Amino acid sequence: MGVPVSQMWTVSRYVITQRLLGRKRYPLVLMLEPLFRCNLACAGCGKIQQPVDVLRKELTPEQCFAAVDECGAPIVSIPGGEPLLHSRIDEIVKGLIERKKYIYLCTNGLLLDKHLHKFKPSPFLSFSVHIDGVGDVHDQAVCRKGVYETAIQGIKAALKAGFRVTTNSTFFRNADPAHVQEMFDELTELGVEGMMVSPGYEYEKAPDQNNFLPREQTISLFQQVFSKAGKAWRFNQSPLFLEFLKGRWELECTPWGNPTYNLFGWQKPCYLVDEGHVSSFQELMDLTEWSKYGRASGNPKCTNCMVHSGYEATAVQQTFTTWKGFWKTAKLTLMGTKSTSAPFPKPVASTKISGQPASFPHAQSDLVPLQVPENITESS
Ligand code: SF4
């Protein structure tokens, strides 16, 4: 598993303590969005469709620290927007390291090499670089040519400088299992610490509404990808979550596991669905009608969701608080993802998943331009 022992120990101690304290709901990863501004406009992204005055705004480091202290989660993920565009991102990271939080700074990698000097390598800091495929496949997914090469240069520079580097990949209907395998091989060869994978969420605001994966197709995709699991592949995720993606382990969402704080406050109910904001973490926990969310609730917004921000916390909780989850995780960790001899669940007939770049709305020659005015995309 691509997670350092010190981090695993911190998380396991935290989860067990919450249980001993009798807390039914507790956060594991704070999703801290310090800005919505981005230097890309990906077709599957539902985060950056904000008015320009909002895109110009940033959370201050003090606001970030207050949210982190209030929430108490041991891990802080910083997505966005593009966090490296934040004018004081180095101060935010420094303050979180001082608080001994494990940070995943999510970046598209375009500015990574250029901004590396602002940070110091730390066991608490990992750059999580967004990579959805190799070469043109990634460029098509992010709707701009040349991004893959720049992101890979950023990864190499960060690794060379001694930083922890992970990757995060989001898959859509047009994902080709063979290509995903090739990407995992390539990222492993580069020396990244671990990879994170997830199907895309069907954001209502995303420009491309035709390529989200229904649940059955998500399962089929990951079954095909992991049918030839590379021995050296390392994932920065719970083995139970990966089993869930393959349809071999049942998980229910715990939306409070990854609470979201951004320019508007604490987002109800989760990172993916925006049904308003409240001003304190306690209000989020107390005032959200949690029974209205998750697949079992029948909420159509949750029907196809298998995104890590909803389910990883459940997987981690099962690992450290149930014998069944602990045993399964230990087995998968020691013996690899193919440790079970049981065949995959019945293949889904409707699942013809193949590389179909032509079906992607943006052909290489038709890459979408930036939606954010040029003068507010670069902060330094
Ligand atoms: S299932 Fe997904 S969309 Fe629904 S509440 Fe959970 S994380 Fe949010």
Image (tube, rainbow, N blue to C red):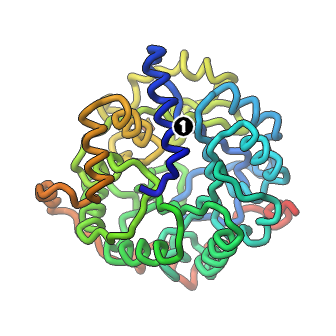
Q: Mark 1 packing: few (<14 Cα in 10 Å), some, or many (20+)?
A: some
Residue type at numbered disc 1: Thr
Image quarter where the N terminus lies is bottom left
In percent of the image, x 51 and y 43: which residue is there? 272
In percent of the image, x 85 and y 60: which residue is there? 379
Q: Quadrant of ligand 1?
A: top left
Task: Name the side, left or right, on which 377 lies relative to 104.
Answer: right
Asked if 93 appears above or below 29 in the picture, the reply is below
Residue 163 in which image quadrant:
bottom right
Q: Residue furthest right?
A: 380
Residue 85 in which image quadrant:
bottom right
Image coordinates of residue 375 in percent, x first then y, are 85, 64
Residue 339 in which image quadrant:
bottom left
Number of numbered discs visible in the structure rendering: 1
Image coordinates of residue 292 in percent, x first then y, are 40, 25
Front residue of 172/180: it is 180
In percent of the image, x 43 and y 51: which residue is there? 237
Image coordinates of residue 14 in percent, x first then y, are 52, 30
Reading the image, the residue beneath label 1 is 10
Image coordinates of residue 222 in percent, x first then y, are 30, 61
Asked if 40 appears above or below 268 in the picture, the reply is below
Image quarter where the C terminus lies is bottom right
Task: Name the side, left or right, on which 22 lies relative to 244.
Answer: right
The kind of secondary structure element at disc 1 is: helix
In percent of the image, x 44 and y 55: which residue is there? 200
